[in-house]
Image (tube, rainbow, N blue to C red):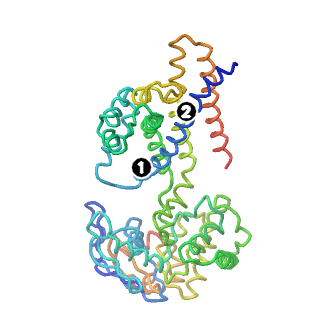
């Protein structure tokens, strides 16, 4: 479903990715762990075209994103990025709900404008999504009147309303108060249980252990270890994985 | 107030409003586009363009007016072409006053629009793009609605600057009563010719007009 091959990514002179590769199968749940700045978010942002890369290739459900050495992507690059974005939803650490729209407007805006769904059908679907996350009573609220956990749940509903083939989560609980982490992870768990192809960057090791089919460990822009969660958490092979886990699980 | 004074006041008032409104509409559209480009895009000679559009803010209005004569005067670079093509001379018309008003208020709008767009979290635009929307739709649905207070401030400042414009207008459009004599020019003429009663009316009306626009904007921006 998602194939990353020999990816090279520079930030100015800093060579972050020096040829990393990763395959994610349809329906698979892959959790990215590793220290901050190790490249987890950058990889997610390369997959959906928010960041360009300078070598290698990314393929999402048969659509290829190529490396871009020019300052600006060409029109064919932009079209490929647009196609990928229709297949892959993304949820950010900072929610990024549109503050001038109500909850329901946030959810129906893209299905109506981009997918051409009728407004009535989009409203019906949005209410159904909101009911599943126990937020139907907040349909007309503005994001500023919601808690962080509620905003993140709406952000997930907004992404799912586009009926993506896969979902990317960039540290979805990192900005939340501890008591709100559970409600967001619960929504994500329900989603992955329904078979959604998912890549999640997170520091929630309990979630990684419980929900992941595979855990990928990043350090300094490199994938240093990838394995089933039980193997990573009970018998990590790489010393840097051991060091990272000992710090974060302390 | 006698009928004569009413007429004498109405002509420059009507002309000032006409010139400022047209100039403000054009400035609002073009200044917002340039402000967005300066905030969000990298392009060739961006800093040079930024410096050139800022120039009318620091140059004496007479210098700006002189440049406008060189460009739009009957024998100017562009004015000559327009005259040869259409037989119409831009200088000394109300349209020349609108051009002068546009040029001096454009930097205010572009700078304010840039600051307004800068204030919008670019991650929200990225979220919109990731939902499959195009750039223009993202600008119209996300960026501009979130930047509206700053844009409104820019539009009001531009209108106020246009209403108060004097030097460049006098240079390019002259002082033709009923045709190019806007409020500030009419006040100058009335004072020079000792018609202090007329000058008083004009000054009071101009002050009330400017104050009303600014007050209305403050109320409007607080309402949301």
Residue A76 placement (x, y as % from top left) = 34, 75
Residue A200 placement (x, y as % from top left) = 48, 76
Choose top left, top right, bottom left or bottom right for residue B104: top left
Label 1 environment density (alpha carbons within 10 Å; few <14, some 14–19, many ≥20) = many
Say whether mark 1 and mark 2 are on the same chain: yes
Asked which secondary structure carries label 2, the reply is: helix
Per the image, the residue denoted by label 1 is B34
* Residue B141 appears left or right of B48: right
Q: Residue at x 45, y 82 (%)?
A: A30
Residue A162 placement (x, y as % from top left) = 55, 77
Residue B65 placement (x, y as % from top left) = 38, 30
Per the image, the residue denoted by label 2 is B15
- Depth check: give the residue in front, A245 or A180: A180
Q: Residue at x 48, y 25 (%)?
A: B176
Of labels 2 and 1, earlier in sequence is 2
Question: Residue placed farthest to the front in the image?
Answer: B87
- Depth check: give the residue in front, B167 or A148: B167
- Depth check: give the residue in front, A110 or A205: A110
Choose top left, top right, bottom left or bottom right for residue A14: bottom left
Q: Is residue A249 visible?
A: no
Choose top left, top right, bottom left or bottom right for residue A71: bottom left
Label 2 environment density (alpha carbons within 10 Å; few <14, some 14–19, many ≥20) = many
Asked which secondary structure carries label 1, the reply is: helix
């Amino acid at each position: 479903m998602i194939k990353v091959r020999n990816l090279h990514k520079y930030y100015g002179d800093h060579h972050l990715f020096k040829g990393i590769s990763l395959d994610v199968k349809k329906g698979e749940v892959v959790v990215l762990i590793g220290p901050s700045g190790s490249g987890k978010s950058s990889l997610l942002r390369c997959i959906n075209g928010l960041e360009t890369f300078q070598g290698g290739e990314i393929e999402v459900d048969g659509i290829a994103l190529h490396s871009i050495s020019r300052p600006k992507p060409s029109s064919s690059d932009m079209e490929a990025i647009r196609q990928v974005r229709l297949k892959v939803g993304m949820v950010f650490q900072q929610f990024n709900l549109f503050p001038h729209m109500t909850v329901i407007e946030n959810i129906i805006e893209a299905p109506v404008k981009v997918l051409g769904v009728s407004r009535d059908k989009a409203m019906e679907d949005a209410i159904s999504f909101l009911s599943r996350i126990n937020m139907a009573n907040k349909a007309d609220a503005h994001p500023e009147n919601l808690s962080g956990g509620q905003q993140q749940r709406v952000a997930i509903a907004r992404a799912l309303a586009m009926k993506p083939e896969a979902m990317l989560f960039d540290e979805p609980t990192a900005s939340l108060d501890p008591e709100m982490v559970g409600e967001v992870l619960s929504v994500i768990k329900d989603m992955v249980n329904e078979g959604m192809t998912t890549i999640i960057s997170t520091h929630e090791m309990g979630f990684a252990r419980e929900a992941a089919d595979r855990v990928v460990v990043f350090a300094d822009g490199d994938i240093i270890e990838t394995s089933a969660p039980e193997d990573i958490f009970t018998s990590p092979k790489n010393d840097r994985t051991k060091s990272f886990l000992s710090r974060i699980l302390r | 107030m006698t009928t004569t004074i009413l007429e004498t006041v109405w002509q420059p008032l009507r002309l000032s409003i006409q010139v400022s409104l047209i100039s403000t509409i054009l400035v609002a559209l073009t200044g917002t586009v340039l402000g967005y480009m300066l905030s969000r895009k990298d392009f060739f000679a961006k800093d040079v363009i930024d410096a050139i559009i800022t120039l009318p803010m620091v140059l004496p209005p007479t210098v700006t007016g002189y440049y406008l004569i060189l460009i739009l005067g009957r024998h100017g670079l562009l004015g000559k072409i327009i005259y040869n093509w259409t037989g119409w001379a831009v200088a000394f018309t109300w349209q020349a006053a609108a051009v002068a008003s546009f040029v001096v208020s454009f930097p205010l709008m572009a700078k304010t629009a840039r600051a307004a767009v800068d204030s919008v979290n670019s991650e929200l635009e990225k979220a919109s793009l990731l939902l499959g929307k195009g750039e223009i739709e993202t600008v119209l649905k996300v960026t501009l609605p979130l930047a509206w207070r700053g844009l409104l401030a820019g539009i009001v400042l531009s209108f106020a600057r246009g209403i108060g414009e004097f030097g460049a207008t006098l240079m390019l459009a002259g002082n033709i009563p009923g045709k190019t004599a806007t409020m500030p020019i009419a006040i100058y003429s009335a004072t020079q010719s000792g018609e202090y009663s007329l000058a008083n009316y004009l000054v009071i009306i101009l002050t009330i007009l400017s104050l009303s626009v600014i007050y209305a904007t403050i109320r409007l921006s607080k309402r949301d």
